[in-house]
Image (cartoon, rainbow, N blue to C red):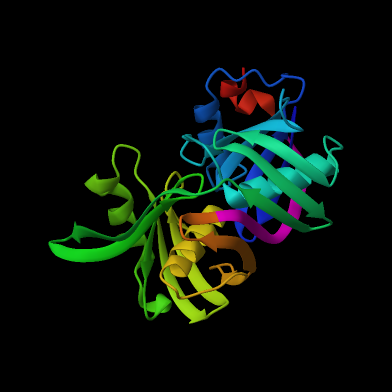
């Protein structure tokens, strides 16, 4: 039997497994993640998170998208991992953990988790690409993983799946592709965001790094000021804090609720990839 938690960060759902003792010796972790995250035939989730020992922080995580690809960072997944570590007595309420994007700091207060992200990079404003023969204006930034951001007047009229998939696969973002965010400005301290996520290959109910990317691009354009409430497709609100300067952004935090949905046991022989 393999014990797991199913958790949700504002609509992003994840499977978390405590692999502290290394007992889960995965022959092919990507294949295992894909099998586990497939909806209707398995547990189903946007991603799989493995919690393991670290030499530099409270723990190290390995994060796998639903398609089996390994990702550097995930904002909502990071918030779930932080709360999971507290619930499992792996770490205290003030903690740091190791990711491929760097060391991430977190503070857990019951079901509210505030995450400090690494400083963004590769910001490019007014990036023009061709979609179906027409020029399309967007911006891009890396907030742990790459994101494209497009500001719209009416978010509900956007075909997020169709446009998002084209942006995600566009040659400008190859070889690894990008996430695609569509943003509607509400006021100086509030926006709405819908995201097509790379690795899930669909629109998700929320995306933490996408929320942060959207806020930072909007701030650079003078449209919002810290803090910013971000309403995602699930209807929940994430709050993003940041400090802006002439050369970029720092002290970036993502805050929101994390829910434990259920705890369960996987029948190991159903997942031969688990080794």
225, above or below 40, in the image: below
119, above or below 56, in the image: below
Residue 64 in percent (x, y) is at 54, 36
Give the number of callouts: 0
Q: Is residue 266 visible?
A: no
244, above or below 201, in the image: below
Residue 153 in percent (x, y) is at 37, 80
Furthest-left residue in this view: 133
| Residue 230 occupies quadrant | bottom right
138, above or below 92, in the image: below
Which is more toward the observer, 268 or 96? 96
Horizontal relation, residue 189 to residue 60: left or right: left
Which residue sits at x=49%, y=62%?
216
Q: Give the dominant element type of the magenta stretch: helix, strand or loop.
A: strand
Q: Which residues are magenta?
A: 250-265
Residue 204 in percent (x, y) is at 50, 58
In magenta stretch: residue 261:
yes
Which residue sits at x=59%, y=50%?
75
Furthest-front residue in this view: 246
Q: Quadrant of the C terminus?
A: top right
């Amino acid at each position: 039997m393999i014990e797991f938690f199913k958790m949700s960060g504002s609509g992003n759902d994840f499977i978390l497994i405590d692999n502290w003792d290394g007992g889960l010796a995965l022959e092919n972790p990507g294949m295992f993640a894909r099998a586990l995250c497939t909806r209707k035939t398995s547990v189903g989730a946007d991603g799989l998170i493995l919690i393991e020992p670290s030499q530099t922080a409270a723990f190290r995580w390995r994060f796998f998208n639903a398609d089996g690809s390994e990702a550097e960072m995930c904002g909502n997944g990071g918030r779930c991992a932080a709360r999971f570590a507290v619930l499992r007595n792996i770490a205290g309420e003030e903690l740091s953990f190791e990711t491929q994007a760097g060391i991430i700091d977190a503070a857990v207060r019951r079901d509210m988790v505030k995450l400090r992200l690494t400083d963004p990079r590769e910001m490019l404003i007014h990036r023009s690409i061709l979609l179906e023969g027409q020029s399309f204006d967007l911006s891009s930034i890396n907030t742990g993983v790459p994101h494209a951001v497009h500001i719209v007047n009416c978010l509900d009229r956007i075909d997020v799946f169709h446009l998002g998939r084209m942006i995600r696969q566009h040659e400008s973002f190859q070889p690894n592709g990008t996430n695609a965010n569509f943003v509607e400005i509400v006021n100086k301290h509030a926006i709405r965001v819908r995201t097509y996520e790379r690795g899930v290959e669909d629109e998700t109910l929320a995306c933490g790094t996408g929320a942060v990317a959207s806020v930072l691009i909007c701030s650079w354009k003078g449209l919002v000021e810290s803090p910013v409430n971000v309403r995602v497709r699930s209807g929940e609100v994430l709050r993003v804090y940041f400090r802006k300067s002439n050369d970029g952004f720092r002290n970036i935090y993502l805050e929101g609720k994390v829910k434990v949905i259920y705890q369960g046991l996987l029948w190991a022989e159903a997942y031969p990839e688990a080794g």
